[in-house]
Image (cartoon, helix red, strand yellow):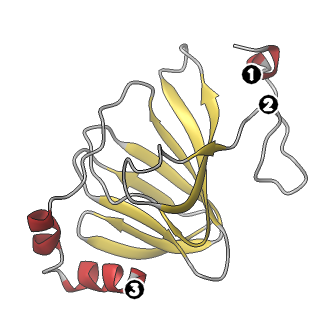
């Protein structure tokens, strides 16, 4: 860990969505899963925490991967507005709304077309790998009109 990463105080930049000593990273490895126009910043990643606090930001029209996994997420919307799908529920969310993602629950965040959308995400430091839906699972999920509309908006 570098001295920059070790600092106990990391001040926000002028725009309020970047922090000293925190790199802006790719959301995921390209080609690993479908996503669009999203970055990741790891704000806290220390062994003594047993969790990580991350900040994700999407450009207008961007989205996270539609996925599920065993680990949970605690999310606070930090910037802008967007749509959130958790399980069979689709909601418009905005700062400072809170979202809990239970284990093995399908979820995705989408930015509105007109503004950036950012959220803080607390997650276990040790986590399982995400699962993507099979075509059959996706077809079954889309039988729910709210989920079908959520995906239709993105197409």
Number of labels in the image equals 3
Q: Quadrant of the N terminus?
A: top right
Residue sitting at x 74%, y 21%: 5
**For numbered disc 2, what is the local secondary structure?**
loop
Give the crowd class for mark 2: few <14, some 14-19, many >=20 residues within 10 Å: some
Residue sitting at x 13%, y 81%: 143
Instruction: Please tell me whether residue 98 is drawn above or below residue 117 in the rendered image.
Output: above
Q: Quadrant of the C terminus?
A: bottom left
Relative to 60, 6 lies left or right: right
Give the crowd class for mark 1: few <14, some 14-19, many >=20 residues within 10 Å: some
In whole angstroms, how far apart are the C-alphas of marks 3 and 2?
37 Å
Give the crowd class for mark 3: few <14, some 14-19, many >=20 residues within 10 Å: few
Q: Mark number for residue 105?
A: none
Which residue is label 2 attached to? 21
Which residue is label 3 attached to? 153
Q: At which x and y percent is residue 76?
A: 55, 54
Residue 95 falls in which quadrant of the image? bottom right
**For numbered disc 1, what is the local secondary structure?**
helix
Q: Camera-side residue: 141 or 34?
A: 34
Q: At which x and y percent is residue 144?
A: 17, 80
**For numbered disc 3, what is the local secondary structure?**
helix
Which residue is label 1 attached to? 5
Mark 3 or mark 2, which has the lower sequence index?
Answer: 2
Instruction: Please tell me whether residue 95 is drawn above or below residue 38 in the rendered image.
Output: below
Q: At which x and y percent is residue 89?
A: 29, 71
Mark 1 or mark 3, which has the lower sequence index?
Answer: 1
Residue sitting at x 15%, y 59%: 134
User: Do callouts 1 and 2 mark residues in contact (Cβ within 8 Å)?
Assistant: yes
Q: At which x and y percent is residue 111?
A: 55, 72
Residue 126 falls in which quadrant of the image? top left
Residue 117 falls in which quadrant of the image? bottom right
């Amino acid at each position: 860990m570098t001295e920059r990463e070790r600092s106990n105080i990391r001040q926000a930049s002028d725009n309020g969505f970047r922090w000293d000593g925190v790199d802006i990273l790719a959301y995921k490895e390209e080609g690993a899963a479908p996503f669009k126009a999203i970055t990741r910043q790891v704000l806290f990643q220390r062994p003594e925490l047993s969790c990580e606090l991350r900040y994700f930001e999407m450009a207008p029209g961007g989205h996270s991967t539609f996925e599920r996994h065993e680990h949970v997420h605690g999310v606070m919307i930090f910037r802008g507005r967007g749509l959130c799908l958790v399980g069979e529920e689709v909601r418009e969310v905005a700062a400072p709304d809170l979202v809990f993602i239970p284990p093995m629950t399908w979820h995705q965040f989408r930015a509105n077309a007109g503004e950036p959308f950012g959220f803080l995400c607390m997650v276990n430091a040790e986590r399982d790998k995400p699962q993507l839906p099979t075509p059959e699972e996706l077809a079954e999920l889309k039988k729910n009109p709210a989920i079908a509309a959520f995906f239709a908006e993105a197409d």
